[in-house]
Image (tube, rainbow, N blue to C red):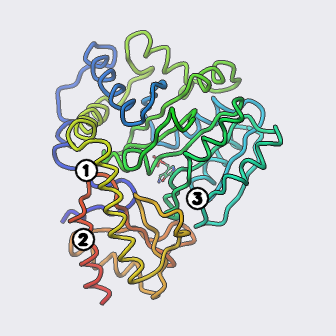
């Protein structure tokens, strides 16, 4: 029996989306690819409220995190860390031999703009890295306000990991002063894994043009060169997934509507949050609750593994806590194409199991 995915990625992929990948192959240097990429980029720019350059990368999101570290940091960067995925990003920068400082928050806590401002006002940093939605803790950070504050520091690039928020929460790239934002498609886009996307500002593209040792595969200008030539990818891309993305974006932009999609995510988050208040507690600071994933503190000491085993028999799966938070927390994802009715069903099943 298929277990419906209420885990924070990969998320449930609907049958019509899966079918959108089933077509006779064409080549990545053929006009079909140019047409497909052109159509995808136009819709992604709408979704992200941006005119910035769109990168479509045959990699998972981590690839584009590395791309940001390699293309954006000039001399020294500030990584603002609040959980496992921001830890990963600072480790990537270090692995790329970049000079970085880390502003560290306890897991479950959200970021304070004044702390970042105190750091960047020293003039030491040319790039700031922030995780929008911390999938490990269920924290969503105020990137709009951080971007606004960074407008006073025009030489700093603002890089955002929106892996588990993009397509599930509003991100107004141009208004919010975001120079590089990346996501994977297996989360709120509700597509199979293997593709990542990003938007890069002119400022980020200029920084990349000067960057040393940025490698080959993730060079922003490799993407730009082939886009300018024929709206094509620099290397052989996962065209079937890009076609599924095109199909999905048609649904998001033209059928459900971008704002409605965000509203649905908030509604689903509200259901899980009400349930959490009644039955357990939040791991995250309540001022920073995510609209795409809730991390529940296991205040009743239930066996999360047993709960998941029983849920499995009923056709669903949730996530145990991440890393050290295993059994101490569990996560319910409410992102992608999942509906409020499916969330209500899941919560009813959990109630029935734990009593
Ligand atoms: N950042 C965040 C916030 C994530 O949730 C994840 C994946 N869970 C990643 C980065 C890494 O993405 P990927 O697995 O697509 O490389």
For the C terminus, which image quadrant? bottom left
Residue at position x 24%, y 35% in the image: 250
In the image: residue 118, left or right of residue 342: right
Residue on which disc 2 sits: 344
Does the residue at mark 3 contact the one at mark 1 (Cβ under 8 Å)?
no
Precedes in sequence: disc 3 or disc 1:
1
Count residues near mark 3 (Cα–Cα under 10 Å), then give few for <14, some for 14-19, many for 20+.
Answer: some
Q: Residue 297 got which mark?
A: none
Locate residue 157: give its quadrant: top right
Precedes in sequence: disc 1 or disc 2:
1
Residue at position x 52%, y 65% in the image: 137
In the image: residue 40, left or right of residue 199: left
Extreme top residue here? 229
In the image: residue 282, left or right of residue 118: left
Residue on which disc 3 sits: 84
Q: Residue 13 got which mark?
A: 1
Give the answer, above or below, for where 84 lies relative to 235: below
Locate residue 5: give its quadrant: bottom left
Query: Which one is in front, 115 or 132?
Result: 115
């Amino acid at each position: 029996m298929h277990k419906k995915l209420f885990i924070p990625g990969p998320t449930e992929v609907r049958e019509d989306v899966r079918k959108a990948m089933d077509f006779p192959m064409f080549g990545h240097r053929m006009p079909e690819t140019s047409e497909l990429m052109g159509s995808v980029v136009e819709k992604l720019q709408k979704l992200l409220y941006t005119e910035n350059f769109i990168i479509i990368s045959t990699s998972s999101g981590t690839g584009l995190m590395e791309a940001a570290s390699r293309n954006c940091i000039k001399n020294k960067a500030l990584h603002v860390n609040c959980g496992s995925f921001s830890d990963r990003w600072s480790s990537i920068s270090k692995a790329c031999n970049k000079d970085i400082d880390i502003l560290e928050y306890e897991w479950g806590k959200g970021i304070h703009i004044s702390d970042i401002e105190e750091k960047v006002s020293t003039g030491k940093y040319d790039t700031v890295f922030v995780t929008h939605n911390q999938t490990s803790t269920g924290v969503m950070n105020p990137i709009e306000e951080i971007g606004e504050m960074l407008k006073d520091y025009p030489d700093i690039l603002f890089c955002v990991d929106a892996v588990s928020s993009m397509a599930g929460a509003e991100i107004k790239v141009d208004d919010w002063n975001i120079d590089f934002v990346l996501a994977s498609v297996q989360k709120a886009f509700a597509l199979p894994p293997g593709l990542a996307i990003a938007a890069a500002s002119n400022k980020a593209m200029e920084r990349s043009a000067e960057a040393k040792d940025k490698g080959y595969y993730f060079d922003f200008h490799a993407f730009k060169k082939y886009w300018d030539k024929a709206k094509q990818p620099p290397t052989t891309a996962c065209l079937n997934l890009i076609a599924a993305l095109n199909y999905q974006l048609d649904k998001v932009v033209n059928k459900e509507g971008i704002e409605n999609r965000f509203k649905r995510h908030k509604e689903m988050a509200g259901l899980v949050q009400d349930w959490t208040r009644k039955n357990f507690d939040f791991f995250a600071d309540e001022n920073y609750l995510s609209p795409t994933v809730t991390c529940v503190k296991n205040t009743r000491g239930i066996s999360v593994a047993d709960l998941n085993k029983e849920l499995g028999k009923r056709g669903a799966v949730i996530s145990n806590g991440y890393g050290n938070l295993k059994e101490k927390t569990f996560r319910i994802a409410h992102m992608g194409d999942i509906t409020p009715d499916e969330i209500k069903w899941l919560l009813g099943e959990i109630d029935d199991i734990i009593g």
